[in-house]
Amino acid sequence: QIEVAAKNIKQVETQLKLSEINLKLAKLDMDSNIIRAPYDGIVLSSVYKEGQYASPGINAISIISDDFIIKADINEIDVVNLQVGQDVDIRLDAYYENEFSGKIINISPISSNVGGVVSYELTVKPETGNGPELLYGLSASLTITTSGVENVLFVPIQSVYEEDGKSYVDLVAEDGGIEKIEVTTGIFNYDFIEIKSGLNEGDTIL
């Protein structure tokens, strides 16, 4: 009877080990049927409903990151003046009365060419704080200051033209005539250009 009991114990132990192995296999099989996103985010759409069988080669779920970012294309002339960590002023069309700040978190090393214009993708992370809730798909305008000066004379950039490597503006003289004046220019953006010499405050130009 003792030998029979010992055999029964061994059989039970063997069955227990087999059950433990089957449990581990079942857990592995269950884990293989769970789809995990590579990052936290928001589900935009799902092709399948609970209980349906998925087919290979079909995108089952579309997700986006819940980390709000802004992407913009910067031309090759300006991108060389930018760097990761640089401050950005942000205006959103939907919240134009609000001013947002942010930082550049990525500058793509790969360019794109559309219509002969070479540009690079810039990624900006807004610092929203306690501001309004930001929604995906909003249009934004970015202002990035790469250099600056104070208390300078500046004119609309389209007022300055070049001839033979020199810069000129057309000055309205006191008698109403037009006088071509050579000027020395400084830093500029898309709208204005600094005038270092050649003009005085209050001068009228075309």
Image (spheres, rainbow, N blue to C red):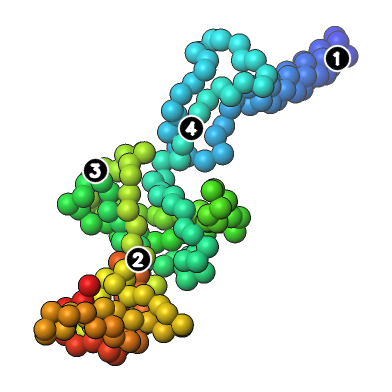
Residue at position x 47%, y 71% from top?
A: 81
Residue at position x 55%, y 56% from top?
A: 118
Q: Is residue 190 above or below residue 187?
A: above
- Locate the N terminus by quadrant: top right
17 or 119: nearer the eye? 119
Splitting the image into 4 quarters, where does residue 3 fall?
top right
Residue at position x 24%, y 83% from top?
A: 179
Q: For the residue marked with disc 3, what is the amino acid?
A: Ala
Q: For the residue marked with disc 2, what is the amino acid?
A: Tyr
Q: Secondary structure at mark 4?
A: strand
Q: Are marks 1 and 3 in contact (CB under 8 Å)?
A: no
Q: Which mark is residue 94?
A: 3
The Cα atoms of the two marked residues, 2 and 1, are separated by 90 Å
The residue at which mark 1 appears reads as: 7
Local crowd at mark 2 within 10 Å, few (<14), some, or many (≥20)? few
Viewer-nearest of discs 1 and 3: 3
187 or 177: nearer the eye? 177
Q: Is residue 31 above or below residue 69?
A: above
Q: Which mark is residue 63?
A: 4
The residue at which mark 2 appears reads as: 190
The picture places residue 53, in percent across and down from the top left corner, at 61, 11
Q: For the residue marked with disc 4, what is the amino acid?
A: Ile
The picture places residue 116, in percent across and down from the top left corner, at 56, 53
Q: Secondary structure at mark 3?
A: helix
Q: Which mark is residue 173?
A: none
Splitting the image into 4 quarters, where does residue 206 fall?
bottom left
Q: Is residue 85 above or below residue 2?
A: below
30 or 17: nearer the eye? 30
Q: Is residue 159 visible?
A: yes
Viewer-nearest of discs 1 and 4: 4
Local crowd at mark 4 within 10 Å, few (<14), some, or many (≥20)? some
